[in-house]
């Protein structure tokens, strides 16, 4: 990803007795440089694992005939197709702009999705269904293949920053080529398995009830004891509270170039080891980079390697990540028996940056705090509702259907509750919690957190935002800091003028030159830039709702897609209000779905809480949410000196 290592004391080669590199060291150096020069798309394509003989990503004609006939091989074939997701590497193919998605009589403009993705990307093939098919979901979960139409259930899901696309699964005859079906992608092979790095004791899925939630966690109290003194000392020396409840200990918004974060870089070894790139120029606070960011990244790497939506190729490659440390501060309770509260909003991390994964490490949690779990929910489209001369399924959508999808309640008599149809979950946080999750698959928020402490109580954490290696690399911090260092030394050096004594430019003049060159902004300008970025980041970039963008009816009907709507989509639009006779149908659905954005009031409650509200209360709270969040945004107080 760019360039020479600018560490001033970088060891070149380790000479042996003959002053030459050993054969093993030379091979490692060769592999390291090859990994950095190879484009990630090419590396991903090269890493694709061919399908085993007799298997294919597409259900073939023979498999379909087995499924359609209640034969001895029926259940085995169904289990083979549906028991677990399959992860593929695909290449984008210039093809048709529209293709039917698995929700009936409508199509989606896939070109607007694939035009914004890398040429090689990953897809998940799995079974899914719409909200209204609760009995269908239950039969899949109970492994009742004789009651399931598999051809309507398999789908491909692609994850990107700007959107998540769910694509229909075609049936292909044995002698057919999938390209004949006009699909905009081709399958190169399976995603390779994760590297054999040993997981730390206690590591596991953050939401074990729902393995589709791509999140992992482990408890590391010793690491918290190690990094907290460094961060507490830095926080005391640099008090920075841009808004009352945030203290920024390490603020990435103060290390930007042209409105983009400047990431740190690390070389990941084949054994999972980490070497920061840049030495003293790796970060403006090199002691925190080495003493905090590096050990947190080392602890998180085995968990990052487990992510699948999408997977990250880590061994032997250079990884970019943004380093942040922050306190969420709750003020003292106003009186005895009262509480101060904090509740977060749904969001993804990274505004203009493509962040593939997030690492959160909570190194301090005040004992007076309660609640504050991290809730995760998939960005996948939930359903497509139609009204008019089409399926008319919008009338079947109601709060009961959404409630079943969120809670996993089965619709079949005698069946126990199962995995929810909407992938989601909540992760309890305590001191020492390390949480890793896919930022491309999931949105997240902090659930209600309260304090009864007589003074301020805080929850302090380190965040590492892992830049999507499939994206164009960001300009690294080490290059910016080295340029700043070199220019400062050059400008501050004594200068000889004709017939005069050596003179030195005053420090304030040097600072103004660096500011004018946009190399090191002056403190006042840096504060203004930071506040502007923070204001943009605090305005929600998406929400759960309805949209008609990119959804097209094949007849005279009207369709709306429900799910997570990302405002990064330039052509995203809210459903129109003048639906004539179908306005009430979509209006009801809109209120039901937008209720998922409301901050929960009860401890430990998340998405499902709003489904317990009375209709009038839900309408009132949803209207207040629209006015407060979508229209007003947030105010930023002046920066601390």
Image (tube, helix red, strand yellow):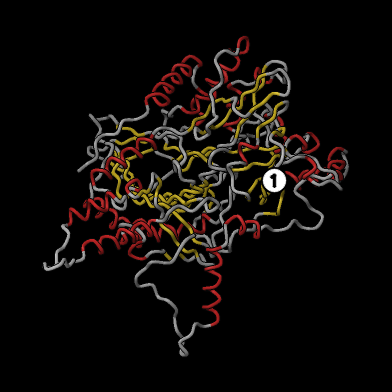
Q: Residue at x 36, y 66 (%)?
A: 279
Q: Residue at x 42, y 37 (%)?
A: 446
Going by the image, does 341 lie left or right of 388? left
Picture layout, residue 345 above or below residue 187 = above
**The residue positioned farthest toward the top in the image shown:** 581
Hey, which quadrant is residue 485 in on the image? bottom left
Q: Where does residue 230 sit, x and y in percent of width and height? A: 28, 58
Q: Where does residue 228 sit, x and y in percent of width and height? A: 31, 55
Going by the image, does 72 lie left or right of 179? right
Going by the image, does 377 lie left or right of 57? left
Task: Tell me if mark 1 has few (under 14), some (14-19) or many (20+) residues whose alpha carbon lies within 10 angstroms of its own.
Answer: some
Q: Nearer the viewer, residue 70 or 197?
A: 197
Going by the image, does 326 lie left or right of 471? left
Q: Where does residue 454 sit, x and y in percent of width and height? A: 22, 37
Q: Nearer the viewer, residue 489 or 622?
A: 489
Hey, which quadrant is residue 564 in on the image? top right
**The residue positioned farthest toward the bottom in the image shown:** 18
Q: Is residue 542 visible?
A: yes
Picture layout, residue 315 above or below residue 539 = below
Q: Is residue 412 visible?
A: no
Question: Where the C terminus falls, by quadrant?
Answer: top left
**Residue under pointer 1:** 93
């Amino acid at each position: 990803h760019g360039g020479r290592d600018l560490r001033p004391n970088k060891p070149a080669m380790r000479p042996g007795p003959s002053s030459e590199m050993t054969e093993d060291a030379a091979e490692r150096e060769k592999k390291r440089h090859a990994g950095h020069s190879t484009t990630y798309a090419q590396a991903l394509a090269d890493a694709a694992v061919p399908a085993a003989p007799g298997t294919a990503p597409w259900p073939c004609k023979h498999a379909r005939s087995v499924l359609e006939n209640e034969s001895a091989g029926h259940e085995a074939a169904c289990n083979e197709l549906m028991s677990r997701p399959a992860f593929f590497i695909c290449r984008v193919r210039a093809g048709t702009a529209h293709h039917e998605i698995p929700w009936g009589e409508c199509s989606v403009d896939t070109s607007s999705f694939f035009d914004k993705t890398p040429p090689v990307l990953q897809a998940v093939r799995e079974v899914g269904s719409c909200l209204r098919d609760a009995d269908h979901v239950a039969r899949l979960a109970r492994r009742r293949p004789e009651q399931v139409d598999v051809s309507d259930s398999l789908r491909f899901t692609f994850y990107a920053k700007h959107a998540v696309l769910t694509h229909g699964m075609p049936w292909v005859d044995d002698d057919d080529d999938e390209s004949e079906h006009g699909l905009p992608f081709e399958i190169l092979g399976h995603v390779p398995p994760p590297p054999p790095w040993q997981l730390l004791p206690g590591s596991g899925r953050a939401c074990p009830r729902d393995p589709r939630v791509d999140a992992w966690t482990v408890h590391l109290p010793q690491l918290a004891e190690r990094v907290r003194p460094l961060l507490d000392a830095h926080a005391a020396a640099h008090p920075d509270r841009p808004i009352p409840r945030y203290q920024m200990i390490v603020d990435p918004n103060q290390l930007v170039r042209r409105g983009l974060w400047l990431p740190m870089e690390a070389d990941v070894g084949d054994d999972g080891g980490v070497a920061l790139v840049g030495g003293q120029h790796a970060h403006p606070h090199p002691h925190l980079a080495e003493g905090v960011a590096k050990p947190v990244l080392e602890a998180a790497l085995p968990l990052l390697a487990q992510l699948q939506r999408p997977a990250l190729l880590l061994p032997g490659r250079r990884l970019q990540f943004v380093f942040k440390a922050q306190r969420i501060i709750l003020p003292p309770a106003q009186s005895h028996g009262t509480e101060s509260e904090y509740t977060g909003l749904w969001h993804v991390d990274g505004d203009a940056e493509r962040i593939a994964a997030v690492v959160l490490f909570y190194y301090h949690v005040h004992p007076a705090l309660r609640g504050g779990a991290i809730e995760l929910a998939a960005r996948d489209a939930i359903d497509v509702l139609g009204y008019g001369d089409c399926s008319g399924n919008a009338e079947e959508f109601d709060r009961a259907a959404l409630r079943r999808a969120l809670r996993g309640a089965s619709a079949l008599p005698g069946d126990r509750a199962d995995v929810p149809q909407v992938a989601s979950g909540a992760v309890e946080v305590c001191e020492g919690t390390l949480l890793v999750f896919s930022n491309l698959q999931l949105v997240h928020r902090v659930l209600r957190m309260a304090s009864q402490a007589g003074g301020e109580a805080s929850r302090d954490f380190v965040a590492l935002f892992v830049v999507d290696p499939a994206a164009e690399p960001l300009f690294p911090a080490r290059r910016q800091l080295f340029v700043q260092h070199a220019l400062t030394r050059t400008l501050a050096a004594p200068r000889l003028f004709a017939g005069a004594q050596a003179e030195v430019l005053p420090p304030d003049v040097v600072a103004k030159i660096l500011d004018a060159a946009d190399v090191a902004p002056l403190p006042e300008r840096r504060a203004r830039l930071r506040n502007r970025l923070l204001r943009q980041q605090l305005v929600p970039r998406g929400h759960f709702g309805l949209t008609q963008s990119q959804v097209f009816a094949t007849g005279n009907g009207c369709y709306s897609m429900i799910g997570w709507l990302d405002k990064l989509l330039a052509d995203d639009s809210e459903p129109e209000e003048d639906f004539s006779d179908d306005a009430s149908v979509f209006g009801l659905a809109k209120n039901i779905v937008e209720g998922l954005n409301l901050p929960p009031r009860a401890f430990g409650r998340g998405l499902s809480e709003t489904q317990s509200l009375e209709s009038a209360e839900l309408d009132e709270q949803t209207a207040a949410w629209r006015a407060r969040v979508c229209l007003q945004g947030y105010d930023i107080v002046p920066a601390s000196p």
